[in-house]
Amino acid sequence: MARRWRRRIIGLVLLGLSAFNGMAWMQAWNLTHYAPAGPVRLRPPEQWSLPERAWTILTGVQVPRPQNTAPLAAGVSAALPVPYRTERIALAGGEWLEVWQDAPPSPRGSMLLFPGYAMSKVSLLPVAAAFYGQGYRVILADYRGVGGSSGNDTTLGVREGADVAAVVAYARQTQPGGPLLLYGESLGAAAILRAVAHEGVQPSAVILEAPFNRLVDTVGNRFQALGLPAFPAAPTLVFWGSMQEGMDGFADNPVDYAAAVTCPTLLLHGDRDPRVTVAQTAAIYTAFAGPKQWVAFPTAGHESLYAADPARWHAAVRPFLAALPAR
């Protein structure tokens, strides 16, 4: 009798582990692979109903492939009121990156812009217009997997670091000389840090909004937003995502990359950000090796800080750019 019960208990444990890993596999797949393009109606997990949370725990969130769907007419955007050129950057294996770019007369430098997770370059048009208005040539980039670029998946900052490096190389080739600055939001900020640490990118300055400190931590923050413990769900999901994408998600740690950043750095963060905590942001800020500034947005969450508080954004960015050496 005792042996039979032991077998049943072992069977139930194995069944539970199989079910848990199956759910984690689905979560990881939907986190790293975009669904067919369609209307995006994503809401923060804090706003989900109990049935929505339960279904998400079982299957993950299916995120439509981000598209560049802003109202465009003849290559002109209402947010960026100048014509821009669409260019493709060829990559190995038949892949490519799509960028938009334009420059005012006698630009003071190049500003390369990179979007957040599940976003395309169209989300950067308002910020690009602000930089253009300050005299910068602007280049807005789609990573592989989104917008006009090839593919339909994401590595959550790992491959995206190489994409940043490819756009930097393109910018230097098409307009040699002059300052080259990088701007990134969330995943874009993390990808910039990886490009500096692992791809040899050496920008004149960087402006970073809400980079996550470690992939496993930011995934854990999302589980906590659902009212679930981060452990063991977050590391299990990162493990399966790493297997699916052929990467090491546990080494995707911008807090470690930050030590390679020696150029002037402006770090922007919303105090109410549930995806990247103030303490996690502080760890990244401490790790920067060069001149640095940290500007907090007291009422903002994990969102475009330009959209959240344009006046505060300009008050932080303008003096930072004005203080940069002209070279």
Image (cartoon, grey):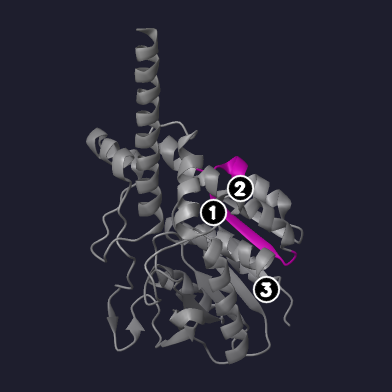
Q: Decide: marks 2, 1 in contact (CB < 8 A)?
A: yes
Q: Earlier in the sequence, mark 2 or mark 1?
A: 1
169 relative to 323 in the view: left or right = left
Other-residue count near label 1 (Cα within 10 Å), few / some / many at <14 / 14–19 / ≥20: many
**Residue 224 lies in quadrant:** top left
Q: Can residue 215 be seen from the camera position used here?
A: yes
Circle 2 SS class? helix
Q: Earlier in the sequence, mark 3 or mark 1?
A: 3
Image location (x, y in percent) of residue 136: 56, 81
Circle 1 SS class? loop
* Residue carrying label 2: 281
Residue depicted at x 60% and y 68%:
318
Residue depicted at x 49% and y 34%:
232
* Residue carrying label 1: 210
Residue depicted at x 28% and y 35%:
54
Other-residue count near label 2 (Cα within 10 Å), few / some / many at <14 / 14–19 / ≥20: many
Q: Can residue 273 be seen from the camera position used here?
A: no
Which quadrant: the C terminus? bottom right
The stretch drawn in magenta includes residue 117: no
- Which amino acid type corresponds to the residue marked 3 in the rendered image? Pro
Q: Decide: marks 3, 1 in contact (CB < 8 A)?
A: no
**Residue 33 lies in quadrant:** bottom left
Circle 3 SS class? loop
* Residue carrying label 3: 203
The answer for how far apart the CA atoms under marks 2 and 1 are is: 7 Å
181 relative to 20 in the view: left or right = right
Above or below, comparing residue 155 to residue 199 in the picture: above
The stretch drawn in magenta includes residue 269: yes
The residue stretch that appears in magenta: 262-280
Which quadrant: the N terminus? top left
